[in-house]
Image (cartoon, helix red, strand yellow):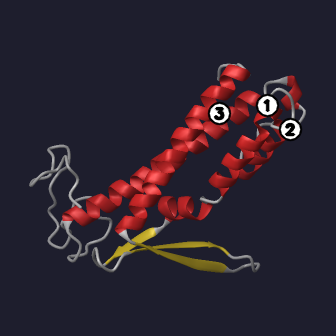
Amino acid sequence: MRPPSWGNRPTSLLRGTNCLYAKSPYAPECNPWPTREEWEVLLLLRGTIVAAYGNVETLLSEFSIKLSHYPEYYALRQKYPHRMKSKLTFIRAAFEIDPLDKYKQLANSFIEKFESTSDLRHMMAHARIEMAGRHTGIDFASYQQSSSPGQIDLRRSRYSYSELELEARRSVRLSRIARLFYNRLTEVLPLPPM
């Protein structure tokens, strides 16, 4: 599980810890059981997932903003959509109109894949981590508004290191696909500068 750049000692880019119970200075809880390697691999994987989805969300935002300047798409929305759900609705509608309609199926497939990751994105960005060690898994806990009025739900998800590593690879792949698709679309429809 050791990251190749760390070797036997942590890289000089990462500091040591002064906490008696935390083996990593980056551990968000004082817990004597997980090793420094376990914490830092966990944080690397979690950070990879958050960074990849941040890239996708920013590309979708940029695409929405730029599209909203075209007269044929401006009619879809009189103001720039701020929430991600509104941006995705706006983008879907834009792919119904020429010249983007040729890419409708690809766009819808990408958006569906992105939407299917909302729980993972939420957990990685907002949840508390609880970890007892590599063999028990990592628990993520987060509160969210319930579907029942006035109620709040505690959501929990447990991931193993191998599951998180797989999700990190998937999220990076989705981020790369988003960039390639964005670049292709800007060749078809030159978008105005920001």
| First in sequence: mark 3 vs mark 2 | 3
| 3 and 1 marks in contact (CB < 8 Å) | no
Tell me, yes or no, if residue 121 can be seen here. Answer: yes
Please tell me how many numbered marks the rendered image carries. Answer: 3
Tell me, yes or no, if residue 191 can be seen here. Answer: no
Residue at 38% across, 71% down: 160
The three-letter code of the residue at mark 2 reads Glu
Q: Distance between the residues labelled 3 and 2?
A: 19 Å
In the displayed structure, does residue 55 sit left or right of residue 82? left
Q: Distance between the residues labelled 1 and 2?
A: 7 Å
**What is the crowding at mark 1: few (fewer than 14 residues within 10 Å), some, or many (at least 20)?**
some
- Percent x, y for residue 6? 17, 50
The three-letter code of the residue at mark 3 reads Glu
Element type where label 1 sits in the image: helix
Give the number of the disc on residue 96.
2
Residue at 14% across, 52% down: 10
Element type where label 2 sits in the image: loop
Asked where in the image residue 13 lies, by quadrant, the reply is top left
In the displayed structure, does residue 84 sit left or right of residue 177? right
* Residue beneath disc 3: 62
Relative to 67, say whether 23 is above or below. below
Residue at 75% across, 35% down: 103
| 1 and 2 marks in contact (CB < 8 Å) | no
* Residue beneath disc 1: 100
Give the number of the disc on residue 77.
none
Quarter in which the C terminus is drawn: top right
Instruction: State the residue lying farthest toward the left.
Output: 8
**What is the crowding at mark 2: few (fewer than 14 residues within 10 Å), some, or many (at least 20)?**
some
Residue at 22% across, 77% down: 33
**What is the crowding at mark 3: few (fewer than 14 residues within 10 Å), some, or many (at least 20)?**
some
